[in-house]
Image (spheres, helix red, strand yellow):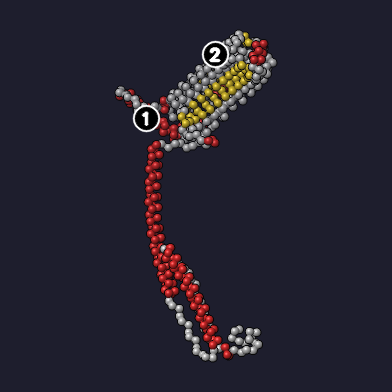
Amino acid sequence: MEKPKIKKLTKDKVQDVLNESNGKAVLDLTYRGIAAMDAHACDDLTVKKIDLSHNKLTRFNFAMAMPLTQLKITSNLLTDSGVADVSFCKQLITLDLSDNKLSRLPGASLRHCTHLKALVLTNNAITTLEWLPSMAQLTSLIVSHNRISEISEKALGKVKGLTKLSISHNKLKELPDLAVLENLSELRISNNQLTALPENLAKNRNLKIIDACHNAVDTWDGLENLSSLKNLKQLNLKGNPLCGQPLDPKSTIEDDAEKKEKKALDKKNKLYNFKMKRLFQGLIVRDGNRVLDKRTHGYVAPPKPDEEEKKLKRKFEKAQKKANKAKENSSEEKKSSKDDQEDNEESASKRQKVSKKKSKQEKPPKDDKPAKDDTSTQNTSTFLMDQSNDSSKSTNQDKKKSSKKDKYAKDSGVLGVVQVKKAKKSTVKSVPIDVTHLTTTTDVGMGGDSAWD
């Protein structure tokens, strides 16, 4: 839907636009065809942002102070005299005047903008940066796509707090000393006419990004000094004669002179890649290509090994695995042979023990000594008979137990070693007692002297 056109911006028109936007903090006046602006059009405004892009303004001005933080007037017809004093906007943080017809930097208009942090002047007709007002809080100066051929060191001394300086697509043949910009972390100088990078650029210790692609750099002087920048993560030199050009294997060249030239460029490219890898090992992005893998939590992975290195590693790992397997097999064979010998020795010893025990058990028990015949001592004979019966019962029980164990071992087919406790031989010999010699007094069994006690 097309926005209604406004030829001249007045206070009433501004109020109508604010009513349409339901009181938002942004005053959007883009694509309105505005060619003129009343000085009091923005009086008493409380908005934080004003966008006047894509109109036909040749000049703008404000008559009253405003709490403005962002002013964007891109793609208009502003000239040097058309940029009014914006000192009324003391809280201004960002000023974007890109795509206009400015031939110099509007320094005088920014004298009182002490809080300005970003100044964007891309795609204008600026030829030099000779003078800048003192802006201590300015961190970003973007003047790319202009006609700048020189930069004054004094001008840069007024903006010492710069962290980003973009001068791409200009006509610079050399860079000034940037050592005064101690906080500089991003330098964009691509598409210029630089023949070398200055050696003193290594003094900017906080540099993280240098984009110098598509220049005329053909020497390593000054470039080798940049290898001392520990914080440098992105370096782009693509499109410089120093880089050479890789030979295309698909190309068919018939002319000998052209072949020599292509080979020379290819050789130069190989030398460039070799030196860059050696000098700048901490780079994440080189010539627009990522050389280190991305990792979570901010960690950076080491570079991927080449295919040849991978093949060598695989061969080495396979050889190691084979050697380890051979060692394991030989050790297992030795262990198994030792275990077999030990098992044979143990089984032989166990068999000998079992055979000895069986032979002992199969021997007939010794006969007890015959009792003395005595007609007068019948009680003694009965006593001896009882003793012999008890001993025979015990031997029979032992035989039954051993026979059961032997039967279980034969049925199961498992050789078992049974530990049998031998009965201790009594040293006291059994002597038949003549009952007739015993006294029948009351002292028997009551603590007196007798054979029972």
Q: Residues within 10 Å of mark 2 (few under 14, many from 20)?
A: some
380 versus 161 height, above or below: below
At 42% across and 28% down in the image, what residue appears?
Answer: 243
At 60% across and 8% down in the image, what residue appears?
Answer: 7
Question: Is 350 on the left or on the right of 382, as rendered?
Answer: left
Upstream in the sequence, badge 1 or badge 2? 2
281 versus 338 height, above or below: above
Label drawn at residue 101: 2
Question: Is 364 on the left or on the right of 120, as rendered?
Answer: left
Gap in angstroms between the C-alphas marked 1 and 2: 45 Å
223 versus 311 height, above or below: above
At 51% across and 25% down in the image, what residue appears?
Answer: 188
Q: Quadrant of the C terminus?
A: bottom right
Label drawn at residue 411: none
Q: According to the image, label 1 marks what residue?
A: 267
For the residue pair 437 and 16, the one nearer the viewer reads as 437
Q: Residues within 10 Å of mark 1 (few under 14, many from 20)?
A: some
**Which residue type carries mark 2?**
Lys
Q: Position of residue 6 (x, y in %)?
A: 61, 9
Q: Position of residue 13 (x, y in %)?
A: 65, 11
At 51% across and 79% down in the image, what residue appears?
Answer: 389
Helix, strand or loop under label 2: loop
Q: Quadrant of the N terminus?
A: top right
For the residue pair 165 and 34, the one nearer the viewer reads as 34
Q: Taking the image as drawn, is residue 415 in sight?
A: no
Q: Position of residue 169 (x, y in %)?
A: 49, 20
Helix, strand or loop under label 1: helix
**Which residue type carries mark 1?**
Lys
Question: Is 247 on the left or on the right of 42, as rendered?
Answer: left
